[in-house]
Amino acid sequence: MSNAQSAWRRLILVPVFPAQGPNPDKPTADKSADMYSRDKNGLFKALGEIYPTGIIEYLPSGSARQSVSLYSFKKLSFMLLNRIMANIICIANQKGGVGKTTTAINLSAALAVSEKRTLLVDCDPQANATTGMGLDKTAIQKTLYHGMIGVATADSLIMQSEIETLKVLPSRVELIGFEVEMMSEPDREMALKNLLSDLEDSFDYIILDCPPSLSLLTVNAMTAADFMLIPLQCEFYALEGLGQLLQTIKRIKHGLNPKLKIAGILLTMFDKRTNLSHQVAENAERYFKNLVFKTTVPRNVRLGEAPSFGKPILLYDATSSGAKSYFELATEIMNNSPNPNKMDMNG
Ligand SMILES: Nc1ncnc2c1ncn2[C@@H]1O[C@H](COP(=O)(O)OP(=O)(O)OP(=O)(O)O)[C@@H](O)[C@H]1O
Ligand SMILES: [Mg+2]
């Protein structure tokens, strides 16, 4: 039995927690959600601190206790565990036009429609993810830049998208200034990590869209992230520069962010009719083995069109092959989260 399974066994054996009694003001079909909302702090502490090593000794004693159905208890525990395990995924490749932003937008949307509370953070001064999500840059007061230089809180910058569970932290061209202004600051690589630390409890997934460089902004994203997702365009020079990117990841893992891992390499703009696409896929699999995502994103006209309508592909053409592939990618990531850990970067 795996650790996770045995932890569940322990959790299930003790289906009790501090009772709050029914809330007479609020008819509720979902008792676990109701209890969670009224008692989240106590329970979060009780469950969050002990999972997965035991539970009994951490349950508050002396208070009234109430049995709950196995279903409610499991659901409640999942909600609490999701609070703890926010996954921050950095989408980076210093090569331009390989599908970083397309992946950031559409992976975020696919996670969000799968009921994951998702935040898309646009770390690129080009702000393609911001406009691709339909946000009007000129109407936005403050952006990621203001958060990273410390004149705005993360909360105050977050904007709602068309999908209820998907929020966006927008960018604009002024973000270029961050690199220059922070050059001599001692903690310049930690600005994004510090900003996002206030939000980690509020989301299941935080997706970071990086600019096409290994600049201070990308280093900030890698420092804040748990996982790297590297899009690889299926074209002749696909693998060029990948060594440099992997070296940078390794350096950041050894210095600024020891927990950083590679979630996977994603083949994008795959055209099954061309030998070149197949060759790139074969080479990637030969060099990177199980590090390559099973999902491949096809070249798909609808994916290229969607940003000009300010919509993720799932809202623009949900039946397209592009939409299907990003939904598959989200499923692959959800199945492996919170610990894809496909590669030991020390190895
Ligand atoms: N699978 C795809 N099929 C067709 N077009 C695609 C696909 N993926 C991306 N594109 C298009 O290719 C172009 C580059 O994609 P995208 O902007 O996602 O790359 P990027 O890596 O974010 O670029 P940059 O390095 O400039 O930030 C865009 O016009 C986008 O619409
Ligand atoms: Mg981009």
Image (cartoon, rainbow, N blue to C red):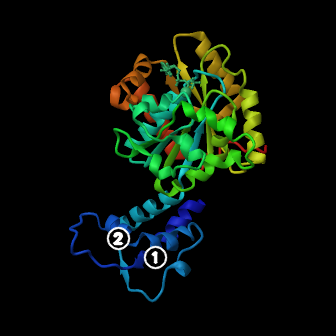
Judging by the rendered image, the residue that carries numbered circle 2 is 35
Vertical placement of residue 81 versus 178, above or below: below
Which image quarter holds the N terminus? bottom right
Q: Under 8 Å from ligand 1: the CB of mark 1?
A: no
Residue placed most toward the observer, 314 or 176: 176
Q: Amino acid at mark 1?
A: Val
Q: Position of residue 48 (x, y in %)?
A: 53, 67
Q: Which residue is drawn at the image coordinates 68% and 16% (left, top)? A: 237
Left or right, 186 with respect to 133, comes to right
Task: Report how far apart the C-alphas of labels 2 and 1 lie in the structure.
Answer: 17 Å
Q: Amino acid at mark 2?
A: Met
Q: Residues within 10 Å of mark 1 (few under 14, many from 20)?
A: some
Judging by the rendered image, the residue that carries numbered circle 1 is 14
Which image quarter holds the C terminus? top right
Secondary structure of residue under mark 1: loop
Vertical placement of residue 197 versus 18, above or below: above
Q: Quadrant of residue 77?
A: bottom left
Q: Position of residue 202 (x, y in %)?
A: 46, 55
Q: Position of residue 60 (x, y in %)?
A: 48, 82
- Which residue appears farthest toward the top when viewing the image? 274
Secondary structure of residue under mark 2: helix
Q: Which residue is drawn at the image coordinates 50% and 40% (left, top)? A: 143
The answer to whether any part of residue 318 appears in the image is no
Vertical placement of residue 344 versus 287, above or below: below
Vertical placement of residue 93 versus 167, above or below: above
Left or right, 14 with respect to 71, comes to right
Q: Position of residue 285 (x, y in %)?
A: 66, 27
